[in-house]
Amino acid sequence: MTSEVMLLNVQGGALAADSALTAIEYHKDGTASVRYQTGADKIFVLDAGLPVASMIFDVAEFYRYQWGAIFETFKTVVPQRGNTVAKVAQSLMLFLARWTSGTDAKAQDLLPLEEGQERLSFAIYIAALVQRYHQCVELAGGQKQQALSRALDMLRFETQYSGDYFQNLFLPQGETPSRRPTIGESSPRLVALLDQYLNRLLSGMLASMFGEGFVPAETKAALAEIAVASCVTDWMPPGVPKTGLVFMGYGSSDVRPMYLELRVGSAFGGIVKHEMVSSAAPTQREPAIIRSFAQADLIDALLRGAQPGYKYVIFQLMRQGITSLLSAVGGEIAKKDTGLAKSVLQTFDQAPLAIARAILMAGDDIARHAMEMRVAEVVNSASPEMLAQYASKLVRLSVIEHELTGSQTVAEPILALHIKKGRAEWVRAKIS
């Protein structure tokens, strides 16, 4: 019995989608445009000896370079990349930090940095952070000062703890949220960047999003503190373009493969803003792992019926509606017995939160079942010969780059990297 792992780049028939990657073009006038790259390479071998490979999805580039060029430079500049999947991923993040901060001369020779790229990366991060604050203000509701203050609490919580303010309302009573991992530390380069550009960027973005003079100076100062603290955590605002990286393969002493999924966004001041999403290895009890990746937000909206931001708005509206209903009932009771009305309202004080949370959690369960059925469609669409080829294996861990939408089955060829202990080979096949 053997263990194996496969990275698959699947061409999907649904919606005429072809697993296109997002490419962002920055223009000299300061604007940017988005285009989609079809037929691009998405799977790369990072270490042929172990082996370890990586697959990209969503954004096709980083610091204006294609990921293929970055991976090749990484292999050239860093001969000792680690002996496990996790260490190879960590080694890549450290390489990106040295390269983007200008401290790796050899990497800069191979991938020259454009003037102002670090400032642009930092500006995109701060712009997205202010945009997220603006969303928090809209969600907070209430009077101006109350909304601005509550939005600061929401953003502060989100940047320092896993999830966001509203998601943590869904935690079972008594549970505490987990702190976000630290992904870097302060340096003279980061401090200089903050001193030179943070105030200017915040002023411009706040004026653009809220209007000149709308946000008081003390609120801006508090937002600046949140921005500074967020630089070293794994939080990234939704507006930052992110590349999904899936690392797969074997460690030198591993007998089973594993995968590790990261999201990589901006980089500035020697810090690469990234988030570790998940990692796992197959077990004898659950020998097969199937993961699927694509244009994440769009696919989430199509499969689940709503993106996270939409869910938070629905949650707020449900809670407000239930609160209004209870208040109206309490008002009617108070006309006859004020003491009873007060007792009823105290008894059901947490009802709006609990009911709204229960409704959304039930919706998530339904969505999870729907996604499992999608995976079943992919497996059922495979030819008997292909399934039989792997039936005798102890482990098959597949990571599919494109997530199907709709009821169609996979119709186009797949490009797969088939990895066994000490060996990786390319496989081109059709699933029909």
Image (cartoon, rainbow, N blue to C red):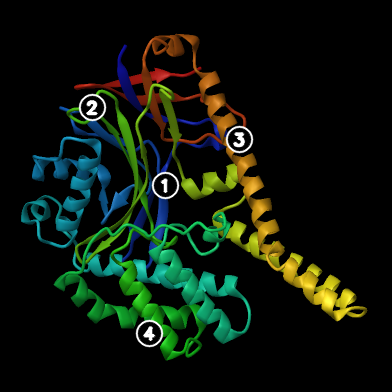
Give the residue type that dot 1 points to.
Tyr
User: Residue 254, labelled with which disc?
Assistant: 2
Q: Disc 3, disc 2: CB below 8 Å?
A: no
How many angstroms separate mark 2 from mark 1 (CA)? 38 Å
Task: Spot the residue most to the left.
Answer: 105
What is the tally of numbered marks visible in this picture? Answer: 4
* Residue in view at x 6 percent, y 56 percent: 105
Q: Earlier in the sequence, mark 1 or mark 4?
A: 1
Residue topped by disc 1? 36
Residue topped by disc 3? 369
Callout 3 secondary element: helix
Query: Which dot, 1 or 4, sits closer to the camera?
Result: 4
Residue topped by disc 4? 221
Give the residue type that dot 4 points to.
Ala
* Residue in view at x 53 percent, y 48 percent: 298
* Residue in view at x 44 percent, y 65 percent: 158
Callout 1 secondary element: strand
How many angstroms separate mark 3 from mark 4 (CA)? 45 Å
Residue 345 sits above or below residue 362 on the image:
below
